[in-house]
Amino acid sequence: MQKIIISGCCGHMGRVVADICKNDPDVETAAGIDLLAQPMEGFPVFSTPAACDVEADAVIDFSHPAALGPLLDFCTEKKLPVVLATTGYSEEQLAQIEAASGAVPVFRSANMSLGVNVLMDLIRRAAALLGEDFDVEIEERHHRRKLDAPSGTALMLADAAASALPYEPEYVYDRHSVRKPRDRREIGVSSLRGGTIVGDHTVVFAGRDEVIELTHRAASREVFAAGAVKAAKFLASVDGPGLYDMSHLISGEKGI
């Protein structure tokens, strides 16, 4: 049985991960890490990674970008594989993640949903086929509590389109202050925040007299938590340190 430490265990996603682990015979929540350190049923909770003295096989992180540094230090010191499902990292933090992947297996994805990662493949295919004849726009919708905008998933989808286009696009996030026609080589990304929307993403390919829309809607947070648990299981099978993502899990590859 694989023992998991949940970073951010007291948050919405951390609790869902804990519920999935509770009902999965192959995994067990060994401990939780959360600044609030609220008591959780079935496992101890520590306020910092350094305070956690429980043996485990992997860490799943659904916390906050500010928690990254101490968490990576903890994982590299303990030689623990880590699944990073938090979004909103800075360029400096992304460099820290890459550096840590030289010491331990690191699985990072802005979206742990299998469906979203299939959507990325469809976007690459569409962008390659449609090329310069279609404008690309991305709209993402999330609940009112989400801190970062645009979402990490929206940027993943933009990157997927950009990787297959015959030109290097410019990402445009805000047009309200600019009065000019849309540039042919833009990828527009817009964000909506409200209510309890779990996560909706639509990629629009708009051409002359026709529009293609590719959409993914998450009905619950469980799809992301379940993907993170699958990622933790996947890390148990890799050969050594490295930076992994959903493409490796889906394809069964063991490295980059």
Image (spheres, grey):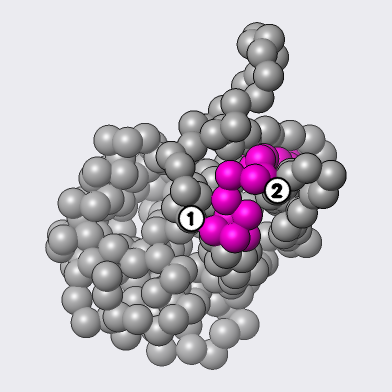
- Quadrant occupied by the N terminus: bottom left
Residue at 39% across / 47% down in the picture? Answer: 47
Q: Which residues are magenta?
A: 126-146
Viewer-closest of 65 and 31:
65
Residue annotated with mark 1:
164
The local secondary structure at tag 1 comes to: helix
User: Against 57, is 131 above or below?
Assistant: above
Residue annotated with mark 2:
205
Viewer-closest of 242 and 228:
242
**What mark, if any, has residue 58 been given in the picture?**
none
Residue at 36% across / 35% down in the picture? Answer: 90
User: Against 221, is 11 above or below?
Assistant: above
Q: Is residue 39 visible?
A: no
Residue 249 place in picture, x, y as percent: 44, 77
Residue 111 place in picture, x, y as percent: 54, 57
Callout 2–callout 1 Cβ contact below 8 Å: no
Q: Which comes sooner in the sequence, label 2 or label 1?
A: 1
- Quadrant occupied by the C terminus: bottom left
The local secondary structure at tag 2 comes to: strand
**Amino acid bearing label 1:** Ala
**Amino acid bearing label 2:** Phe
Residue at 67% across / 45% down in the picture? Answer: 134
Viewer-closest of 159 and 66:
159
Q: Is residue 27 visible?
A: yes
The answer to whether 183 appears left or right of 243 in the picture is: right
User: Against 250, is 31 above or below?
Assistant: above
Residue 63 place in picture, x, y as percent: 47, 48
**Quarter where residue 142 is shown:** top right
Disc 2 crowd rating (10 Å Cα; few below 14, some 14-19, many 20+) is many
**Quarter where residue 180 is shown:** top right
